[in-house]
Image: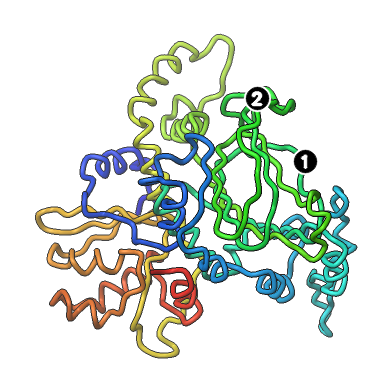
């Protein structure tokens, strides 16, 4: 296991870098391909490069992603607390007591639930309702974020924004991550400006507090429109100009891509320094300063940037998933459920899979089975066996038991059907 033996992390990643497989390709997802076509991107390398705007070729996909009533249904059925659920009205954020309440069961268990009657009132008057990390509740959004992560090799989270009537949005602000905005319904006016600090960070030595005066784009986004706003670019969205559209609304999803920086790399190296006892000793004014200064370049050389990025992918922990253990029937269908594509190395005698902090080895003849099971698409085990001529049952069970794959429940399958090809 990678996670169980931290001292091997750098060397393991170095081996992976030296044996990259050209066959490893993320699966095709409708949202990913639609974003690429809308922004005229060939791949994810344009992420963070500049402001881009376009329209998806299949705007009907928006209804499949999310609708206002489906968003409200999700809010109604979940226990949500501030700041995951927020409401803004007249340019101000409302106290959560105005739209949530503690619901106590007869056994005294309390849950914070949305007051749907209050939300309905705010929606009629005009408000902006924000639900963060929808991917943690909705299978289709979870799969969409996984597809975007496999595509971009970055962590992705989706937040949703419902604005009604001519309510104001947020004031001019910048995000510490790249975002791709997909307008799902209605209309909203956007303004995007340039940066006032190069590559600003959440934790920084200097804040970018003064908005840029350079307006790069201003206009209206409609269903199917896609916007890419890199980190640090000032922007705002509002419906205050819709004075003649009291019954109108806007619904958009913002996919946030959290990229790694040089600071993250150095922090990772600092963590690896614990493997060397010289760095674990107390510092003193007359002590080991020269020795440490000599060891730092060696440490950096052992753990270069590409090793860090790859270790970051292979060490991601297991995702949440339904585990039945065969209690309700035999395992028939599975899907790879990892934050990033598993790394597969084919040697002369075995095929090795690196994912979720683990190293899994299979007989080399199992390679076609392994690649099909880890494609990112839902797969039927019996069909894989028929297509490859290699029994897939034991391999599938191992991948599920080790947390690389998950049993394909009807709910998870629906998430794929909703947005897949």
Q: What is the quadrant of residue 69 in the picture? A: bottom right
Q: Which mark is residue 409?
A: none
Instruction: Tell me which colouring the rendered structure shows.
Output: rainbow
Q: What is the quadrant of residue 252 in the picture? A: bottom right
Q: Position of residue 419 (x, y in %)?
A: 47, 69
Please determine whether, in this image, residue 112 is positioned above or below residue 347. below
Q: Residues within 10 Å of mark 1 (few under 14, many from 20)?
A: few
Earlier along the polypeptide chain: callout 1 or callout 2? Answer: 1
Frontmost residue, 286 versus 195: 195
Please determine whether, in this image, residue 346 is positioned above or below residue 210. below
Left/right placement of residue 394 relative to residue 168 reads: left
Seen at 41% across and 47% down, the residue is 153
Please determine whether, in this image, residue 167 is positioned above or below residue 62. above
Q: Which residue matches tag 1?
A: 171
Please determine whether, in this image, residue 118 is positioned above or below residue 227. below
Q: Residues within 10 Å of mark 2 (few under 14, many from 20)?
A: some
Seen at 29% across and 69% down, the residue is 373
From mark 1 to mark 2, how far is it between C-alphas?
16 Å
Frontmost residue, 102 versus 413: 413
Q: Position of residue 18 (x, y in %)?
A: 22, 40
Q: Position of residue 114 (x, y in %)?
A: 80, 70
Element type at mark 1: loop
Q: Which residue matches tag 2?
A: 196
Seen at 71% across and 76% down, the residue is 77
View extreme (left): residue: 348
Quadrant containing the C terminus in the rendered view: bottom left
């Amino acid at each position: 296991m990678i996670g169980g033996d931290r001292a091997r992390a750098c060397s393991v990643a170095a081996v992976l870098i030296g044996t990259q497989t050209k066959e490893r390709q993320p699966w095709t997802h409708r949202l990913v391909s639609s974003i690429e076509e809308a922004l005229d991107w060939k791949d994810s390398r344009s992420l963070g490069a500049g402001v881009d705007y376009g329209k998806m070729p299949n705007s009907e996909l928006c209804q499949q992603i999310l609708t206002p009533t489906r968003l409200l249904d999700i809010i109604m059925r979940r226990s949500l607390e501030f700041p995951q659920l927020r409401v803004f009205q007249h340019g101000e954020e409302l106290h959560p007591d105005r739209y949530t309440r503690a619901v106590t069961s007869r056994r005294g268990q309390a849950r914070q639930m949305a007051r749907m009657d209050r939300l309905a009132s705010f929606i009629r008057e005009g408000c902006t309702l924000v639900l963060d990390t929808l991917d943690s509740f909705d299978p289709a959004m979870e799969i969409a974020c996984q597809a975007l992560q496999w595509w971009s090799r970055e962590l992705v989270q989706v937040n949703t924004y419902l604005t009604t009537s001519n309510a104001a949005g947020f004031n001019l602000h910048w995000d510490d991550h790249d975002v791709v905005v997909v307008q799902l319904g209605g209309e909203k006016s956007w303004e995007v400006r340039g940066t006032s600090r190069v590559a600003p960070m959440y934790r920084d030595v200097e804040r970018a507090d003064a908005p840029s005066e350079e307006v790069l784009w201003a206009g209206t986004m409609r269903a199917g429109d896609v916007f890419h706003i890199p980190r640090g670019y000032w922007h705002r969205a509002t419906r205050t100009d819709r004075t003649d559209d009291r019954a109108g609304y806007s619904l958009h999803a913002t996919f946030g891509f959290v990229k790694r920086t040089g600071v993250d790399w150095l922090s990772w190296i600092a963590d690896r320094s614990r493997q060397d006892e010289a760095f674990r000793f107390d510092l003193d004014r007359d002590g080991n300063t020269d020795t440490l200064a000599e060891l730092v370049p060696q440490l950096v050389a052992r753990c270069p940037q590409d090793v860090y990025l790859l270790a970051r992918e292979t060490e991601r922990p297991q995702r949440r998933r339904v585990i039945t253990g065969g209690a309700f029937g035999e395992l028939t269908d599975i899907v790879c459920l990892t934050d990033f594509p598993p790394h597969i190395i084919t040697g002369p005698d075995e095929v090795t899979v690196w994912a979720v902090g683990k190293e899994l080895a299979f007989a080399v003849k199992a390679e076609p089975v392994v690649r099909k099971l880890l494609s990112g698409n839902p797969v039927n085990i019996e069909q894989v066996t028929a297509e490859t001529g290699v029994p897939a049952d034991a391999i599938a069970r191992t991948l599920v038991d080790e947390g690389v794959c998950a049993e394909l429940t009807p709910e998870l399958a629906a998430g794929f059907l909703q947005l897949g090809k």
